[in-house]
Image: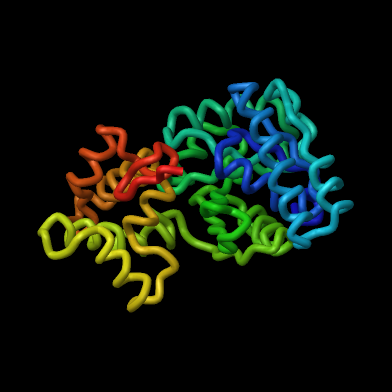
Amino acid sequence: MNSSDINTLGIVGTGAMGRGIAQIAAQAGLTVNLYDANPQAVEAARKYLQDTLAKLADKGKLSAADAEAALARVKPCGALEDLAGCDMVLEAIVEKLEVKRDLIAKLEAILRDDAIIASNTSSLSITAIAVGSKHPGRIAGYHFFNPVPLMKVVEVIDGLSGNPAVGDALMALSRRMGHTPVRCKDMPGFIVNHAGRGMNIEGLKVAQEGVAEFADIDNIMREQAGFRMGPFELMDLTGLDVSHPVMESIYNQFYQEPRYRPSPITAIRAVGGLIGRKAGAGFYTYAD
């Protein structure tokens, strides 16, 4: 299996990540089959892609013909069985191990034996996701970052039972889609989320100890440390409904190593619904 064999990509889960991946794949010339357990979510995702591609054409970032052709390559699917002809399927669903394993079992009943199954998980073990599958060699991690079209890095993760040729194909596919792939082993948090613990968790500790306000910590990380966003801006963008469980998951996977300990600040805010931009309020308010 090499990247030139991947021409039809199935995406399961049409939230922010699924949409973003669909956009860069369609722009790179792949046929994209979109499926979500909620049919309205598929329609909403295709409408979002239509609007996004039209905006890019208006700004002169791509031609109107290219925008139209990319959208034409995005096919809404009403049933999982519609993904049968895909060369590869990427899941971008809820971060729950059993749910992902169930989906893989269903996909294995539909797909041909050499089709790649990739997971956009940010914190679950790829080796664990592949346990119980018929062909664990074809399962790999393929972790993009939000917003996908702008965040040009993607992690390619080999599980212990993974076939290296699958990882090679994903590395090449990333470049075809204009992204920079990084290859990593199956360890908690992979590379980016592992390194990011330093900024987010330490940022929370600084706030928790009353050393500085959220905005001051963000300003310092942006203006002095050179990050595009500070930890609180970043958590608001990602949403605490995603980032707090990731913190807990990585902490537990490292056997409660103290430096990965999550903060009660995010635990309370997640419970209280102050999860970030998508809720209109997080560490900052988003009135518009």
Classify residue 9 as left or right of residue 121: right
Q: Nearer the viewer, residue 42 or 118?
A: 42
Say which residue appears at 32% left-offset and 68% top-offset.
Answer: 219
Q: Position of residue 68 (x, y in %)?
A: 85, 46
Residue at 52%, 54% in the rendered image: 145
Q: Describe residue 94's horizontal placement relative to residue 112 as left or right.
A: left
What is the number of callouts on the image?
A: 0
| Residue nearer the viewer, 12 or 160 | 12
Q: Quadrant of residue 2?
A: bottom right
Q: What is the basis of the colouring in this image? A: rainbow
Residue 89 vs residue 180, the one in the foreground: 180
Residue for point 56% across, 63% down = 153
Query: Which image quarter: residue 203?
Result: bottom left
Residue furthest out toward the right: 65
**Coordinates of residue 180 in the picture (x, y in percent):** 61, 66
Q: Residue 149: image x %, image y %?
A: 63, 56
Provide residue 199's location: percent of width, then percent of height.
30, 64
Residue at the farthest front position: 288
